[in-house]
Image: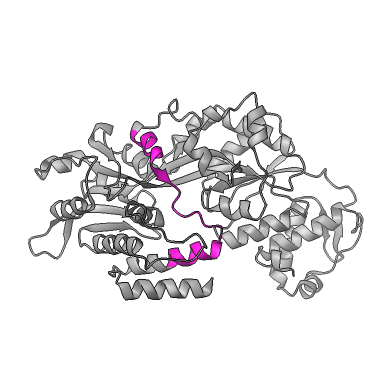
Amino acid sequence: MTPENKRIPCTKRIAGELEQKIRDGILRTGTKLPSVRELAETYHTCTSVCLSVYRALEKKQLVQREPGRGTFVCRSLPPEVKEYVTSWNGIYPHAKMSAFLDRVFADNGLEHWRQNPFYTDQYSESIDYLEFSGKAMSHPGTLAMDEGLLPVFADRDLLYPLDDFLDRSRVLRRTDFPEKLLKTFSYRGKLYALPFLFSPVMLIYHKRLFRECGMPEPLADWTWEELYRNTELLTRSSDDGKHILQYGLGILFTFNSYIPFIIQNGGELFDANGNCVLSSRNAFEALHFFSELFALPGVCSHKFGDPRSALADLMANDLMAMMIGDAVDYQYLTRKLPPDQVGILPLPARRLRSTSLSAHGWAIHRNCRNPEAHFRFLEHLYTSPGLGELCRHPDFPFPAFHPEDNGVPEPFLEALEYARPALTSPSPTAVKMLCETVSTLLGHKMILTPEKAKSFETKINISL
């Protein structure tokens, strides 16, 4: 097994290699294939994996199993499906996206196009799969992309630049997308993906709970200290102090929640050479404040395994007054509360205004056989009448294509002026280690100290 494909799921890798040999005629029609046990010995894996391999090939009508005789290459092979759209599970896990893509295929006469789901949200596996699939028959073609994956893939020359296609297109124009989102999907001056969905992190609050507590609504020029103080004031506890009756603040527990505080304080997590600088003064000050905020009894976080709507449900049921959340939280909330009771503001600021930007887009693989056809597919995708319906589902962020015409609230559009991707390092290892380190700290409601920051920073840099 070569280094570039060792992390690809074993079943997918073996099935892909056998399919390639069948398509290329190396395994001729009618050829008897090794038994499941023999195949397992060849690939140094278990028989259950190899049984799944043969079932996958049988489903594609490439092999047929005959009881008592073995497995044979079919004498009549189906035509090769040549164009694929790869959707990463970590970006688009929702069944509605799969149904939307199928509808685009059907509505535009794309009979030979298929979805190629890849069930991982790990950057390292994604990179290996892209490098391997660039040489294999089932190439990825069009790729679902997020703002974190883009610099990782573009730095490895795995993506096709789209500037010329977009400039020549009679269907799509640069002005169809917010300029900030086009920059988000650019790397070293080239556009590598078209933005599809976006979501800046905002302060969302319940207006009626502020009135009931006799407090004025937050203002756009709120500071960190005011956020901390109002979180305490909006927290209601039982008479014995043992139970929280109303949380002052809820936080979507991802790095998109705490990175804005670092940026606002003039800090960075990686320097120009790619080294972690977690203990630098500005970064430490911001994370120290956030760890103190996060440790308050009146702060509730969205935990792993919770429904995505968990924070919105708390606020809708008058159990939480404020939330550091995103477009998905807002869309869930406005389905349960009258929109005029839901306030949206920029995050409280420090030295400068900033927020995190999550964005999803579509790119084309560098080794795609027919990039022109895949860009035409993108033209169909963005102009499909089903796009607006898809983005109205609360599990999806806001549409990046003509956002004003698709009902994106003005505060979210205004936030694009000062929003930036949370982490844009081309090193997947660095990003993963940093996120795990800070998440462990916050998850245990520990306060960051200079000693801990320096220790974390050293461990990350040694690993890099």
Verify whether residue 423 appears in magenta. Answer: yes
Residue 372 in percent (x, y) is at 73, 35
Closest to the observer: 431 or 125? Answer: 431
The residue lying at 82 percent from left, 69 percent from top is: 35
Q: Which residues are magenta?
A: 411-436
Could one spot residue 159 in this view of the protein? Answer: yes
Could one spot residue 89 in this view of the protein? Answer: no
166 lies above or below 3: above
Farthest residue in the top direction? Answer: 170
Query: Which quarter of the picture shows residue 103?
Result: top right
Q: On the picture, is 79 further left or further right than 48?
A: right
Assign the magenta stretch its main secondary structure.
helix
The residue lying at 67 percent from left, 55 percent from top is: 130
The residue lying at 52 percent from left, 52 percent from top is: 148
Query: Which quarter of the picture shows residue 9?
Result: bottom right
The C terminus - image quarter: bottom right
Residue 270 in percent (x, y) is at 46, 61
